[in-house]
Image (cartoon, helix red, strand yellow):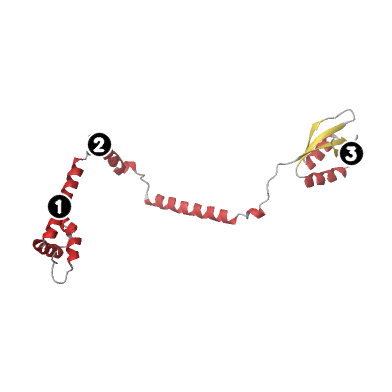
Amino acid sequence: MSSLDDTTPPRDAHVSLDEYATGALPADEQRRAELHIAGCEECRAELETIRRMHERLRNAYEAEPGPSARVRREVMARIARAASPSSRWSLPAWAQIAAIVLIVLQGGALIRTMSSRAPASQVESRTVAQMTRLRVVFAPTATEAQMRALLESIGARIVDGPDAAGAYRIEVSGDPKRVADALGAARARGDVLQSIDVAQ
């Protein structure tokens, strides 16, 4: 195979044959390729092979069935609906800017909230409140108002009673330390409480 000219290696003509066949070469290179092909039988044969292959591909593409008329109508209708002004929000520019600013502020607040949370090691675990049952005997001179006030002060409620001995069963909810503090405070009220013990 001969070269395009004395300064062009023979390989360049082969590299550009496909581009030459499709007309993709710049005008000056297209002319150089034409001159070379006119004098190179090997390149002419290869160019003919390329052109036949392009022709077969074009024929195969054209033989493929296109979308049906119904599909084409549906696609065009969807495009028309999407392009119509009524399908878009018609918010004024200031409302769109306000919405963007609001989203940015909310995102910043969310990030700040998440970053300011205590690490897992400092978070106190929630425990189900424990119920402690106690047996209480009120002083014979205690009024109903005094008894209610005492029960409220220790966070207790009556669940049973009075029994034959005049004792009530009460429940105090909370952690053991709080219950112990409540019992200490209740025992100090001798004018209202005669005795308080853990129920059996």
Q: Residue pushed farthest left? A: 38
Q: Residue pushed farthest bottom? A: 7
Q: Earlier in the sequence, mark 3 or mark 1?
A: 1
Q: Residue pushed farthest top? A: 164
Q: Tell me the CA gap for discs 3 and 2.
A: 90 Å
Q: Is residue 73 left or right of residue 141?
A: left
Q: Tell me the CA gap for discs 3 and 1.
A: 111 Å
For disc 3, the marked residue is 195
For disc 2, the marked residue is 73
Please rate how many residues cluster around mark 3, counting C-alpha atoms within 10 Å: few if below 14, some from 14 to 19, many from 20: some
Q: Nearer the viewer, mark 3 or mark 2?
A: 2
For disc 1, the marked residue is 51
Label placed on residue 70: none
Query: In terms of secondary structure, where does tag 3 sit?
Result: strand
The image quadrant of residue 46 is: bottom left
Please rate how many residues cluster around mark 2, counting C-alpha atoms within 10 Å: few if below 14, some from 14 to 19, many from 20: few
The residue shown at (23%, 35%) is: 69
Query: In terms of secondary structure, where does tag 2 sit?
Result: helix
